[in-house]
Image (cartoon, rainbow, N blue to C red):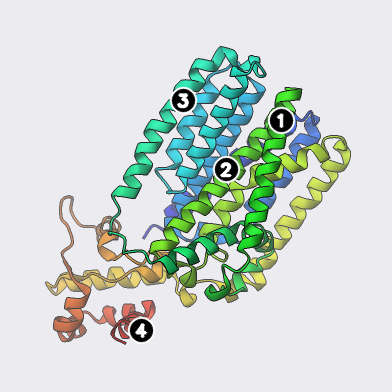
Amino acid sequence: MRVWLWRSRQITALALVATVMFLLAHSAARVWQMNGVAANSFAAGLTAVMIFQPFMDELIAWPILFIHLTWISLVLFTLWSLVRLVANPTKGRWVWLAAIAAYGSMHFMGLGAAVVAATALIFCGLLFGIQRGKLNEFRPIKSQLKLALIFLVVVGGAHAFCMVLLPSNPPPPVSSQNLHASFAQAVALVALYPLAIATSFGGVNSILPVNREVFGDPWPFGIAIAAAAIWIGLRFYRVALSRRTPATLTRLVLYAFSTTAFLGWVIMVGIREIYETDRLGDYGFLVGPRYIVPISFLLVGILLALMLPLLRRGSSVTAALSVLIVAAAFWTHYNYDKNVYLRTRLLRGVSHVEAWREIVATARESRNAHLKVPNLPMATLSEGFNFLDLKFFEPILRDDLQLPAGEHCEFIDWVTYRERERATYDAAVPSLRKVIETLGLEETAGSRHN
């Protein structure tokens, strides 16, 4: 397997995230009239904090999480385009860049539906301000705002409709008890998630267990925080319409986008938990890097909206603090890698590279013995996507086996192999035994029979 290719792809995706994050923070800071040095320092500091967060290691280590990094880039690009739209209210291209990036995020993660909803809300707010005569500077692009809003509602709505109606597996029936528990747990996330993200920047969350039985207990705090967030957003909207300055409009866009997208995500989690009751217990929305990291970037708009008004007056202090923050972020990440990550990493110490080499050897030996390749369960190597098997990775396997164009691998079902052909494969494919031990497939099989 070309390890360098996969690692280069992950690092490139991360570099794209860092670039767009810097552009977003720098543009927002400039709108708030920070000078060049302070704006650059602030953008570098915030980008370092987000990129060097300890859980980012997992998004780089797992090739499949490339989709999460791409989704983060699209979210940040959408928000950056909206900030640029506020700073340049007569340039319609920013409207379409934001709309296209928002819809594009739906093709990488279902959470993109919340991004589309947040972008559509921003467009609705601008159109409402134009209609009331408060935001006349946007009147030259009123028609483009309407068309982009229609595009998001029609195309994004159709996409979301298909996501609901065309699941890979039909959902099980819903009980009233499960519905109530899912509601409580989803609302509790509003209160728990800011704490989870804050502690995750020190690598603390990765060693905290999630107790499903008490997970929904803080739901009253979630309702209170959601109500306060909505009240703050309405206040920002009134201030933006009364003052009509780029700074207040930018603050409104940043805050409204992140708040709406976050609340939309909470709703989607609640719907998901109605049907998938084991997910919080298996991995945990509060401890899983593939949840924590994307949502931390989704909330960055709120952070910018609250920080920039406080930092714009002290440019020299902002620059000095930003340098210290960069150093602190780098040191925290280094310390996490050295002292924490090795004790908390997933896969029970399984190396992707070594496991894949053993899988390729198993496939080669099977073909040499004129046997079908065992369709190994790949849940151990697929970051929580338990439905994946070796057949899903056949293009990579064919490449490593150097098969001629058009020639495919034939697979034998894993259950069929275990029940009928195990003795044959034990004699002809010695590497298979090592793969079974490496991936813990004996334990998996045992747990299924119990």
Q: Mark 3 near mark 1, Cβ–Cβ under 8 Å? A: no
Q: Which residue is mark 2?
A: 260
Label placed on residue 268? none
**Quarter location, residue 320:** top right
**43, above or below 193, in the image:** above
> CA separation, marks 2 and 1?
17 Å
Determine the residue positioned at 60% across, 62% down: 219
* Front one among 197 and 368: 197
Rendering quarter of residue 411: bottom left
Q: Nearer the viewer, residue 352 or 146?
A: 146
SS state under label 4 = helix
Q: Position of residue 32 (x, y in %)?
A: 76, 30
Q: Residue furthest left?
A: 370
Q: Residues within 10 Å of mark 4 (few under 14, many from 20)?
A: few
- Residue that lies at the very extreme toward the top in this rendered image: 140
What secondary structure is marked by label 2? helix
Please say if the residues under marks 2 and 4 sit with CB atoms less than 8 Å apart. Answer: no
The mark lying in front, picked from 4 and 1, is 1
Looking at the image, do the residues carrying marks 2 and 1 touch, with CB atoms under 8 Å apart?
Answer: no
Which three-letter amino acid code belongs to the residue tagged 1?
Arg
Q: Is residue 146 visible?
A: yes
Q: Amino acid at mark 4?
A: Glu
The answer to whether 139 is drawn above or below residue 274 in the figure is above
Q: Earlier in the sequence, mark 3 or mark 1?
A: 3
User: Please, what is the three-letter code of the amino acid marked with disc 3?
Assistant: Ala
Number of residues whose C-alpha sits closer than 10 Å to that of mark 3, classed few (under 14), some (14–19) or many (20 or more):
many
Residue holding disc 4? 443
Q: Which residue is mark 1?
A: 238
Q: CA distance from mark 2 to mark 4?
A: 43 Å
Q: CA distance from mark 3 to mark 1?
A: 24 Å
